[in-house]
Image (tube, grey):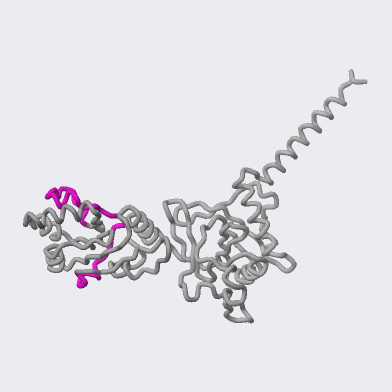
Amino acid sequence: MPAKRFTVLDLIDIDLKEHNSLNLRCIGGRKGLNRVIAIPDINRPGLALSGFYDAFAHERIQIFGRGEVAYLKKLADEGKTETIVQMFSYPIPCCIFTYNQTPDRNFFEIAEAAQCPILQTDLPSSEFSSRLLRILSNIFAPQKSVHGVLVEVFGLGILILGDSGVGKSEAALELIERGHRLVADDVVEIRCMNGNILMGSGANKIIGHHMEIRGLGIINITHLFGVGAIRDKKQIQLVVVLEEWNSEKMYDRLGTQEQTMEILGVQVPKLEIPVKPGRNIPIIIETAAMNERLKKMGYFSAKEFNQNILKWIESDSARSVYFGQEDFI
């Protein structure tokens, strides 16, 4: 289930644009718009309309395409409404008619009596189904909120974490000044898509692209830097943890040991960056982003450096043994 109760009315009112728009409108059964959608899947009720209700997926949204509507017309012409009455005896979330199709009067009356919402869209069945499944997958995806900043650096989604006051927002502001983009500040909402992709966005669209800078206050990134400096959402591909410099802690100086952080069951590469006066954190984060992109391309700088050192040691040892032989003289 999503974080909050998701109803048919929420599905109609969801803010979607362009290739994601569902173009839904209610044409009947308005009293049932508060019905809960509990399953992120759809069903084509062809078998149910023919009278076969074994394993009927009534908890799913029911999609009526041209084939189902043609069969409904056949039932109406024959005066057979028993299977329709039986279908609406189940707690169906809603029925959606594609291609701007409209059911007959008997269907409307039965649906109204059952208080089941009847929706209509102008989209073809296949296109509407793919859009709806994509949207439901996003809504029902596992999610959590974290305190941090999400930025896009060189095309890589970087989640900046750390204690309050360590300088997360200031580092992100410098990155934006250097041409990178802000996704969310302070509260980042993370969703796990398809079981292995973490998508991050702002928890609130109204305040999502604002930043709080201590001593300066709230600033609007869109107004200051333009729409090119923001993104609505981005996949999280690297976690950077900022922490106060601890002289007693041993920090990784080679980078051969890869660290990860588990978020919603997904392992994400993690870097711990100590903060102290004189360290340029934004440039370090930029370099980390470029280095991570190289890793994804199969080039691991630290491991290559380590292998070169080992080769050099081995060749030097071999040279010493060779020159140390008595017969060489």
Give the camera-side residue of 285 and 110: 110
In the rendered image, residue 124, in percent from the top left (x then y), is placed at 32, 56
Magenta-colored span: 29-58
Give the camera-side residue of 40 and 83: 83
Determine whether 214 is above or below 102 in the image: below
Say whether residue 39 is magenta: yes
Image quadrant for the N terminus? bottom left
In the rendered image, residue 262, in percent from the top left (x then y), is placed at 49, 54
In the rendered image, residue 227, in percent from the top left (x then y), is placed at 57, 70
Number of numbered discs on residues: 0
Q: In which quarter of the image is residue 289?
A: bottom right
Image quadrant for the C terminus? top right
Give the camera-side residue of 317 and 70: 70
Q: In which quarter of the image is residue 81?
A: bottom left
Question: Which residue is painted at 46% across and 51% down in the image?
Answer: 196
In the rendered image, residue 53, in percent from the top left (x then y), is placed at 14, 50
Q: Which is the main secondary structure of the residues drawn in magenta?
A: loop
* Residue sticking out furthest to the top: 327
Give the camera-side residue of 99 and 287: 99
Question: Which residue is painted at 31% across and 68% down in the image?
Answer: 12
* Residue sticking out furthest to the front: 77
Question: Is residue 311 toward the left or the right of residue 290 in the image?
Answer: right
* Residue sticking out furthest to the left: 79
Question: Which residue is painted at 54% across and 70% down in the image?
Answer: 185
Q: Quadrant of residue 284?
A: bottom right
Determine whether 202 is above or below 71 in the image: below
